[in-house]
Structure formats: structure tokens, C-alpha cells
Amino acid sequence: MAIGTVLLVFLTAFFSLSIYTRHGTGIQVPQLQTLPIEKAINILKAQGLEYKVDSVYVLDEKPGSVIQQDPDPGTMVKENRTIYLTVVTRNAPPVALPDLEPYTYREAIATLSNYGLKVGDTTYKPDIARDRILEAHFNGQIIKPGTKIPKGSKIDLVLGNGEGASLVNIPNLVNLDIDAAKFAILGAKLTLGTIVYNGPVTDSSTLKVIAQSPNVADSAKVNIGTRINITVTQAPK
């Protein structure tokens, strides 16, 4: 009788505890990672689970999405269990733009990456140092080192092309003799174009320039190698 009584008490306690703790039953934690936080919350509410949300900024991750959860997906839990969610914040923290001008393009990429920034478009302008950073732009505006910008932003870079200045002044050739005009064109890194003769030519060594195209009034500067056309006439002896 004693043994039967102990056994009865044990079985009663065991089954009562199983019922109380819902042994062998529970709610399976759903897969919530990569879901928008709003959708994840709706799923948890529908399954009778509680939630707490924390946020963190992660570069290249979609803002508002779940990137971590605890417990893991597939874990069996009781009703009203709290599920902890980590969500990518929508507001990127500000970072200071580093000084890029001493760097080359490759060095600038590594530096920007260390600051959580990206390289956007690249353009070139005349400068003797090839691929050296000349300017940094953000949203179409030049920005200086130390300027606060959102982490993850793209920075457009202006690089040197290694060729120096590509624009030169147009020399004034009018009233020069033809040899002096040719010398001036060559010295300005320009090219002699068409020579138009005005009137009869009796001595090609004494020709004088009376017009040029393009002229100084049309454009103060032109690209290196631009053709300069001249009109000449016979100068008086």
C-alpha cells in the first residue's frame, strides 16, 4: 500500500507538471530575419508572442529590416515568450569626411571604407599628379575635410589626369609677320590651320596676318592642339 501510495503521488505530480508546463508542446519561433520590422511584429502577435526591439546601423543593409533574433528560428517556446529583435536603423549616424587630398584614388577608396563611406562617381580635371584627389563632392557640392555626412554616403571624387593644364590662351596674331605668327602658335601649344591669302603674293617671306580664327575676342582659352586659321596679305616693302 505504501509503494502504491508513493507511485500514485509521483504519477499525479508528473502529469500535473506536464500539463502545467505544457510538456512536449509549445510555439515554434518563426524565421524573422530579413523581414521588415512591421511584418515581423504582426507575425509574433498572431502567434501569441511578445517582442522587444533594439536598433543598430549596418552598412549596406536595408533600413527597417530584422538582422538578428533571439531565440533562434525553430526554437520551441511558451505562449507570451518575449522574442528579442535587432533592426537596422533608418537614421545613419554622421561621420566626418577625412582629408583625401594627399591620397591617390586607391588610397582614398580604402580610407573612405574605413570611415563607412563609399566612392561615387569619378571625374578628371587637368593636374600634373595623375589620380591624385583634387576635390570631394557630396550631393553636387564641394565638401571640406571634417564635414559631417551620413555614414554610408557616396562621395564623388575629382582626380588629376596627369596632363597638367589642357586650356591655353589664344595669342593675338594680327599684324605679326607669318613667321612670327607660326612661332606664337607653336609656343602656345596650338596648331596652324588654314592659311588664306588676301590679294596677290609677291614675296612669301613678307606676309602679314590681318585676321585669325578663333580670335582673342571669341574665346580667351582653347584646348591644347586647337587649329588656328589665319588670313595673310602682302606687307608693303
Image (cartoon, helix red, strand yellow):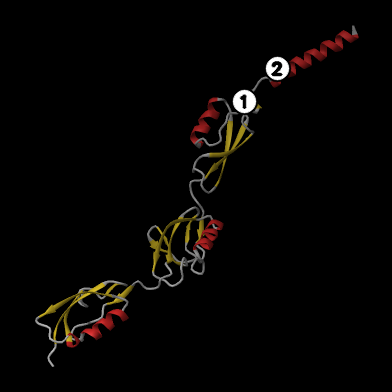
Which structural element holds mark 2?
Answer: helix
Mark 1 and mark 2 in contact? Answer it, CB < 8 Å: no
Q: Amino acid at mark 2?
A: Ile
Is residue 118 placed above or below 68 in the rendered structure?
Answer: below
Expressed as whole percent of the image width and height from the top left, the position of residue 216 reads 22, 78
Q: Position of 201 compared to 144: left or right?
A: left
- Pointer 1 residue: 28
Is residue 201 placed above or below 45 in the rendered structure?
Answer: below
Of residue 126 and residue 2, the one placed in the foreground of this image is: 126
Q: Position of 228 compared to 136: left or right?
A: left
Expressed as whole percent of the image width and height from the top left, the position of residue 232 reads 16, 81
> Closer to the N terminus: mark 1 or mark 2?
2
Which structural element holds mark 1?
Answer: strand
Q: Pick the quarter of the image with the N terminus.
A: top right
Q: Residue at x 89, y 10 (%)?
A: 3
Q: Pick the quarter of the image with the C terminus.
A: bottom left
> In the orientation shown, which residue stands out farthest toward the bottom?
237
Q: Quadrant of the rendered structure where residue 169 is?
A: bottom left
Q: Quadrant of the rendered structure where residue 161 is?
A: bottom left
Q: CA distance from mark 1 to mark 2?
A: 18 Å
Q: Amino acid at mark 1?
A: Gln
- Pointer 2 residue: 19
Of residue 148 and residue 42, the one placed in the foreground of this image is: 148
Q: Position of 37 compared to 168: left or right?
A: right
Expressed as whole percent of the image width and height from the top left, the position of residue 187 reads 32, 81
Is residue 180 placed above or below 138 in the rendered structure?
Answer: below
